[in-house]
Image (cartoon, helix red, strand yellow):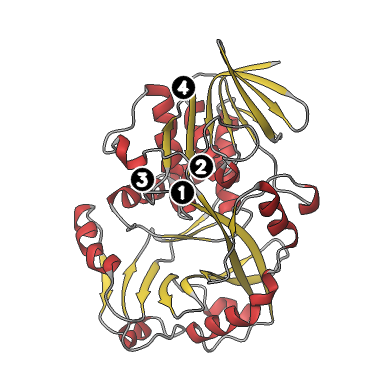
Amino acid sequence: MDKFDIIVIGKGLVGSAAAKYLSFKNKKIAIIGPQEPLDYNKSIVFASHYDQARVQRLIGKDSVWTRLNLESVNQYQTIQEQSGIHFHDPTGCLYVNPTGEDSYLYQAASLASDFKLTCKPYPTGSAIVNDFSAYHFPESSKGLLEKSPAGLINPRLLLKAQLAVFDQHQGININDTILDITHHNHGYTVTSHEGNIYHASEILLAAGSFVNFFNLSAQKLDLKLKNEIILLARLNPEQTKELAKLPSLLYEIDNGTTEGIYLIKPVQYPDGNYYIKMGCNMPEDIYFDNIEQVQQWFRNGNSDQFINRLKQELLKILPDIEPLAYLTKRCIINRSIHGRPYIGETHQPGLYVASGCNGYSAMCSDAIGRVASHLLLNKKLPENYAVKDFEIFYQ
């Protein structure tokens, strides 16, 4: 049986960040989780970070999210230098509401002042298009532009970079899928699908949307799990070059069939092609109750049935593009009760959790991981955060 001081269960963006920070403290740290699956039909768990582009914003929905975003982005240069892996493109982030000012735009100015951020407001749709002619928005639109370091990140490469730094500090990286956590007098024993057994004094459970499945925790978190469909539009090299400086977009549309669009400029995917990425919520979105439903979604979900609808919405925003092809990707997000992550010690002493990130974790995963690691090592949250910010709610 392999013994560790701390085991991080879940090798996603939050888990890898937490493991990295824990490894700085001369402890024996392991991170355990599966690699990105080559065959979805054989995989037990999945993740949404199997992707090339995520929006990086600065001003979040409240001060907690804003602080997490800024603390993360301020570490990117260091992570890139330490790992030798470039994952951040500070092309800017544009927020637009087609019907005018909303609650986010109303409070953004106050948050920008509190955190000493400079943003550019837009009073009309034409004002936005004057700066970004590729985009099209109704004249009734209002918006806000965050410049560098807002933009986008490559989640696959961010994960790779975090694990590279973890490896440099003698962290142990194990490619197993944990199915059982058992508490006993001397800590915890964890058992993997592969039949391996590991022991640790403390556990950080960072299993994303799979945190409530299997026998990982005696008491389940109060989370809602929802599917997410991504449209990828393949562009030719000429149009890719023309849109190379386009800021990431958060578009607060809600027209009854599409809600909350996010869009990212063309980036290169593993097949060598460049794709614009667009995601959103739809009335047909699925809420999951069990692991079998999630597995069915990732393996065989009919996301392609929505290509035409998503295509139409994309071409309203970028009317001059001429994609060569369209395809979809299937993802999953989880939503907590209070709209912020659950970070804390569970009712089982020594079992900690960092989950419930509401679809926002990619852009601030480094800070979420740092907060969780600080809690494990110091038995308290870092300065500027309160227990209520990340309070855990159970089913």
Nearer mark to the viewer, of 4 and 1: 1
4 or 1: tag closer to the N-terminus: 4
Element marked by disc 4: loop
Q: How far apart are marks 3 and 4 (CA)?
A: 20 Å
Q: What residue is shown at x 70% (from left), y 50% (from top)? A: 292
Q: What residue is shown at x 51% (from left), y 68% (from top)? A: 281
Q: How far apart are marks 2 and 1 (CA)?
A: 9 Å
The numbered disc on residue 14 is: 2
2 or 4: tag closer to the N-terminus: 2
Q: Distance between the residues labelled 1 and 3?
A: 16 Å
According to the picture, the residue beneath numbered tag 1 turns out to be 357
Crowd tier of the residue under label 2, counting other residues whose Cα lies within 10 Å: few below 14, some 14–19, many 20 or above: many
* Labelled pair 3, 4 in contact (Cβ < 8 Å): no
- Is residue 138 visible in the rendered image? The answer is yes
The numbered disc on residue 71 is: 3
Q: Which amino acid does label 4 sit on?
A: Lys
- Image position, residue 51 (x, y; %): 62, 58
According to the picture, the residue beneath numbered tag 4 turns out to be 25
1 or 3: tag closer to the N-terminus: 3
- Is residue 234 visible in the rendered image? The answer is no
Crowd tier of the residue under label 3, counting other residues whose Cα lies within 10 Å: few below 14, some 14–19, many 20 or above: some
Q: Nearer the viewer, residue 221 or 84?
A: 221
- Image position, residue 245 (x, y; %): 47, 72
Q: Nearer the viewer, residue 393 or 274?
A: 393
